[in-house]
Image (spheres, grey):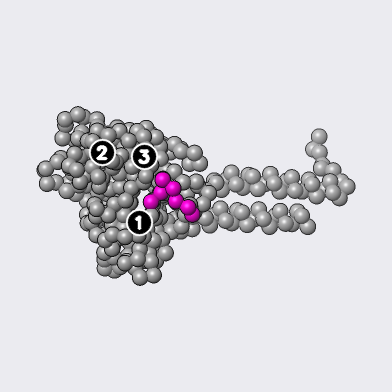
Amino acid sequence: MRFLYVVIVLTALLALAQSASANLLVYDSFEYSNASLGTAGSPNWVKNGGSPDPTVVTGGLSYPGFSDSSNSLKYDGSGVNQGSGVPNATDGRDLTGPNGGSPLTSGAVYYSLLLKVNAIQTFPGGSSGNGWSSPTSNLAQGAFMAGLQTLVASAAPATATIAAPLCIRPTNPSPTQFTTTFQLGTARTSLGPDRTYTANSYNLGDTIFIVVKYTFGANSPTDDTATIYVNPSLDAEPVILDGNDVNVTGGTALNLGTPAGIKSFFVRNNSVEPDDQQIDELRIGTSWLDVTPEPGSAGLALCCAGMLLNARRDRRRRAGGAPRSDG
């Protein structure tokens, strides 16, 4: 009876592991050639804008619980030369195809990634090396580097069509253009005054795990919310928020577009961001399980096989027998 119980439990565990990412819409560790994402990642990624977009580079990011990848995506602060009038370049990724051809309109949409900021300023005085942009509003409101949107993947993001952007700014209060610690935040849209940041700050060179969530309310979009978790436990979504987390319930409501709903995800090179930062291990889904790593199926199967063998041996011992020997 105990043996049968073990078999049932382990079978359920294997089924759970296989179904845990059933709603995973996107997984990307940027295993492309070393070139701009819009070129190397095509047709998965579609570039919009004429200035440089993020670039695939050799060298993945490492974080406990994650498998190591060989590449990552680099932002270099050259999205647009200040004052040139050239739009910031973005790369978009469609979410409607993985969702059965429909926009996402209910429940929650999550995305997660690893982030590492290597340097704030790499070319002092240069047009693509300005560090944080110095106007007071940018130092306080920061910049957005990625997010969900209600436009198609090939469209340039607009303020009211961006949902739960990933935002970054120099540590406040009293930041300068060259502040070397930073805070992370989000908002319901990308409108600057609505962006809300973590109480905690983060250091150059640290690899950070980030989960961002956009939740549709009962009266969407007026009661929708945006949440960011920084370095959360992989086990479960936090119930009690701390200085690494922010939940935004107010501010400008999202423009759901036509047809209504979230349709794509984008990454954005921007000259008011740090000049050298990387992201890796991008996941987008509709649950916490979708966007956090799960045990590899091969490893789990091996573990299950070992547990079954031990259970069988224990069964024989209880019956008064002994394991057979091949010797």
Q: Quadrant of residue 174?
A: top left
Return the residue at label 1. 248
Does residue 263 appear left or right of residue 18 in this picture? left
Q: Residue 201's mark? A: 3
Mark 2 surroundings: few (<14), some (14-19) or many (≥20) residues within 10 A: few
Describe the element under mark 3 as helix, strand or loop.
Answer: loop
Q: Amino acid at mark 3?
A: Ser
| Mark 2–mark 3 distance (CA, rounded to whole Å) | 14 Å
In the rendered structure, are the residues bearing label 2 and label 3 in contact, judged by CB atoms less than 8 Å apart?
Answer: no
* 59 is higher (above) or lower (below) than 298: above
Q: Which residues are magenta?
A: 239-246
Image quadrant assignment for residue 271: top left
Residue under the image location 46 percent in, 57 percent down? 287
Q: Which residue is mark 2?
A: 174
N-terminal-most mark, 1 or 2: 2
Q: Quadrant of the N terminus?
A: bottom right
Q: Main secondary structure of the magenta part?
A: loop
Of the residues tagged 2 and 3, which is closer to the observer?
2
Q: Nearer the viewer, residue 249 or 208?
A: 249
Residue at 86%, 50% in the rendered image: 319
Closest to the observer, 233 or 194:
194
Question: Is 137 located above or below residue 248 in the figure?
Answer: above
- Residue found at x 84% / y 49%: 318
Residue 308's spot in the image, x, y percent? 71, 48
Q: Position of residue 248 (x, y in %)?
A: 35, 56
Q: Secondary structure at mark 1?
A: strand
Question: Which of the two residues, 202 or 316, is positioned nearer the viewer here?
Answer: 202
- Describe the element under mark 2 as helix, strand or loop: loop
Disc 1 versus disc 2: distance between alpha carbons? 23 Å
Q: In the image, what residue occupies the spot 46% across and 38% down? A: 63
